[in-house]
Image (tube, rainbow, N blue to C red):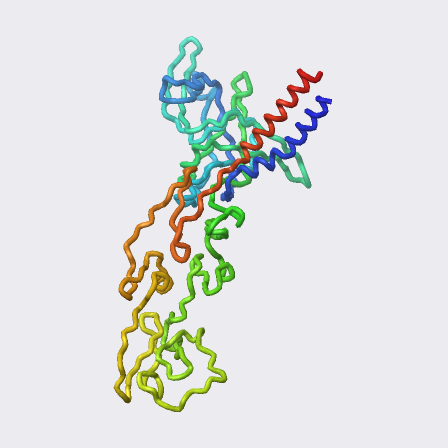
Amino acid sequence: MLILLAFLAIIAFSIIQPNLKQSWEPPHIIKRLRIKAYTNGGFFKYFECLGSTDKPYKICCTGYWRDTKSRALADCYLDGPVKIPPMNLSDEELMNAYEVWIDGYFAKDVERVLINAREVDRNCVYDPDDREYRCGKFYDYDFDLGYKDKFNCWYEDGKVECQRFVLKLPDGIIDQLREGFEIYSIAGDRDEDYGYVDGRFDIDGYLNVKIRVECTEDEHCPGAAPYCNPDTYKCVECLVDEHCPEGYECVNNRCEKIDPYYCEKDEDCVPEQCCHPTSCINKAFAPDCRGVICTAECVPGTMDCGQGYCACINNRCQAIITTTTAPTTTTTIPECTTDEECKEKYRSCDAVCKDGKCIILPVEHPPKTCPDGTVVEWLDYPICDYPPCPEKDYTLIIIGVILAIVFIFILIKIFIWR
């Protein structure tokens, strides 16, 4: 019975493991660069100093020539590399890159794959006993990807088709993505009698880079910015006007209160009142004057009878009163009575009403650090607050507790109930 339960548990874990890994992986995008190139690779007779730590090189080989140096008995060299061109990545993308690989490669008779290999020294000595010149070549490199001989080709419709594989690159290569790098291959000497085998390292695929982003879908965006911008992969307050409350519109992914007095030209402005107008408003918010009956008089201080007109001044619809037919009493109307009026008028969280006038205080809102170390930025008008800190993820703790309970139950079954 216990064996059956253990077998079922293993099957269940193998099924859910890929889904768990996918759920734990952070939101990311994959940038790709098309690569189609190959190299025949060099060949090495001997690896006499592989892994040497007391020399200014990491790998070397030895070649032999007859005393006339007219014929190589066994040569060694690195052939031309596969050149990986630079990737167009921003500083932010490079900083958030965390996994790099090449898909679509095969290697035939390749013993080692080196990144950015370069010859740093060589020397030749004469061996009078064997009447041969012995020449050593010494190489350095950035990364050794080890043994990569994977080759499986067949003929299909008269063409050679080859199985291709994935080549995982070290994380250190991330720093070289914007400059590009070179991949060298070594085809070792497979013939004991001075011969050599030319290898082949072939790529027909893509250089792939995983880059962390804030979001790729809306479910990654809780709180005050619940929508994922598909162009920037950032959580934003809105994408379209429908995402905003009534009376607001979406401007640069922010919900901003619609200003009925905003204008760009005089033609945008119309009288705000149906009768004896004294102010102007954007024509999109013009009053509905159907059924309204006005008195047939020219009221002083209004735009009646050509005494004034609407104009767009500093992007605000204003009434310009040009003529008065009778003396009028001027009453000073305060600009504001509450802070909220100023905040809405100037679309600023730091606007306050003081002595009937709106002023904007020079307040700084530095980033706030959450208990888990997450840094959140101040969300300006109309939010006027910081987004909530991420809730603690108890997924791993719950899984650990469940596994511990199962383990204890199995021990009890084995040692107590048997």
Tell me the quarter of the picture where residue 403 sits: top right
Q: Is residue 8 above or below residue 32?
A: above
Say whether residue 104 is left or right of residue 119: right
Q: What residue occupies the far top of the structure in this picture?
A: 129
Q: What residue occupies the far right of the structure in this picture?
A: 1
Q: Is residue 396 above or below residue 229?
A: above
Q: Position of residue 391 (x, y in %)?
A: 48, 41
Q: Is residue 159 visible in this depiction of the protein?
A: yes
Front in this rendered view, residue 403 or 155: 403
Q: Is residue 209 visible in this depiction of the protein?
A: no
Q: Is residue 103 above or below residue 290?
A: above
Residue at left 35%, top 86%? 304
Front in this rendered view, residue 180 or 61: 180
Residue at left 47%, top 18%? 46
Front in this rendered view, residue 234 or 249: 249
Q: Position of residue 103 (x, y in %)?
A: 55, 37
Q: What residue occupies the far bottom of the structure in this picture?
A: 296
Q: Position of residue 283 (x, y in %)?
A: 43, 76
Q: Position of residue 187 (x, y in %)?
A: 52, 25
Quadrant where the N terminus is found in the figure = top right
Tell me the quarter of the picture where residue 254 sits: bottom left
Front in this rendered view, residue 60 or 125: 60
Say whether residue 301 is left or right of residue 195: left
Disc tally is: 0
Quadrant where the C terminus is found in the figure = top right
Q: Is residue 135 above or below residue 38?
A: above
Residue at left 58%, top 34%? 165
